[in-house]
Amino acid sequence: SQKIEQNSEALNIQEGKTATLTCNYTNYSPAYLQWYRQDPGRGPVFLLLIRENEKEKRKERLKVTFDTTLKQSLFHITASQPADSATYLCALRGYIPTFGRGTSLIVHP
Amino acid sequence: EPEVTQTPSHQVTQMGQEVILRCVPISNHLYFYWYRQILGQKVEFLVSFYNNEISEKSEIFDDQFSVERPDGSNFTLKIRSTKLEDSAMYFCASSEGGIFQGAYNEKLFFGSGTQLSVL
C-alpha cells in the first residue's frame, strides 16, 4: 500500500538556522507533491507545490526539492524564525490527496 | 481572501447520537473533501465530493457516514450513530479543480475544523 513517511520526532533548531524536513514515499509515483503548514488546532495551509519534472522550487525563505528516483522530497526553511514553529505536512496529490503524519518544527529564539 | 468556514467549532455528543458537521466551501470551488485528525495522528482522508456525488471514499467512511450538499453553498458530514472512536477534529476542504479536470496539482483550502468529542 502507499506510504508517506515523515520524521515523527520534532526538529528543534535555533533561530536563524536552516530547517530541513524530509518526506519519503513508497508504492507511489506522484506527479505532484505539496507541502502544508499546520498550526495546533487549525487546518493545514498550503505552502508549495512541486512537479515531478522540477528538481527544486522556491518561495521566499522556503525551498522544496523533489527526487523521484529516491522517492523523497526535502523542505527547507532558511533564516528560520520562532514564528515558523508549526507542523509541516507533505501531501501526495493523486486520485486522493494523501497526507503524511507531519514533522513538528520548533525554532528557539 | 476567501476561506472555508466550518460550524460548529466544537461539538460534544453522547455515544449513539447523530451529529451533523457543516461546512461552507469557497464559492467557485468544485471539489469538496472531509478529513479527520485524531489527536496526535495524521490528517486522514474520509471522502471527496464532486458534481453532487461522492467521487472517492476511504475505508473509514462506512455506512455510518454520509455527505450532502443540500443547497448551493453548504456541504455537510453526518455521522448517524457516533462511537467513542469518532472523537477527532474534522476538517472540510475544497479545491478549485481536481482529477476530473486532469488537475492533480490543485491545492486544498481547509477550514479551521470541528472538534468532535463523543462521550
Image (cartoon, helix red, strand yellow):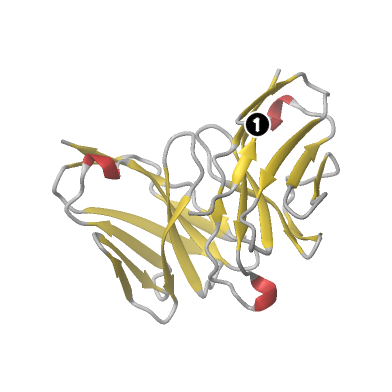
| Residue at disc 1, secondary structure | loop
Asked if residue A46 is positioned above or below residue B83 in the image, the reply reads below
- The residue under the point 62% across, 69% down is B97
- The residue under the point 37% across, 71% down is A66
Residue A52 position, x and y percent, is 44, 77
Along the line of sight, which residue is nearer the eye, B110 or B99? B110
Q: Quadrant of residue A90?
A: bottom left
Q: Residues within 10 Å of mark 1 (few under 14, many from 20)?
A: some
User: Which residue, given by chain and number where applicable, does mark 1 sit on?
Assistant: B8
Asked if residue B97 is positioned above or below residue B115 in the image, the reply reads below
**Quadrant (top left/top right/bottom left/bottom right) for the N terminus of chain A:** bottom right
Residue ranking furthest to the bottom: A53
- The residue under the point 67% across, 53% down is B33
Residue B23 position, x and y percent, is 67, 44
Along the line of sight, which residue is nearer the eye, B60 or B20? B20
Number of numbered discs present? 1
Asked if residue A56 is positioned above or below residue A7 in the image, the reply reads below
* Chain of the residue displaying label 1: B
Residue B83 position, x and y percent, is 76, 27
**Quadrant (top left/top right/bottom left/bottom right) for the C terminus of chain A:** top left
Residue A28 position, x and y percent, is 55, 68
The reply, left or right, for residue A57 in relation to residue B112 is left
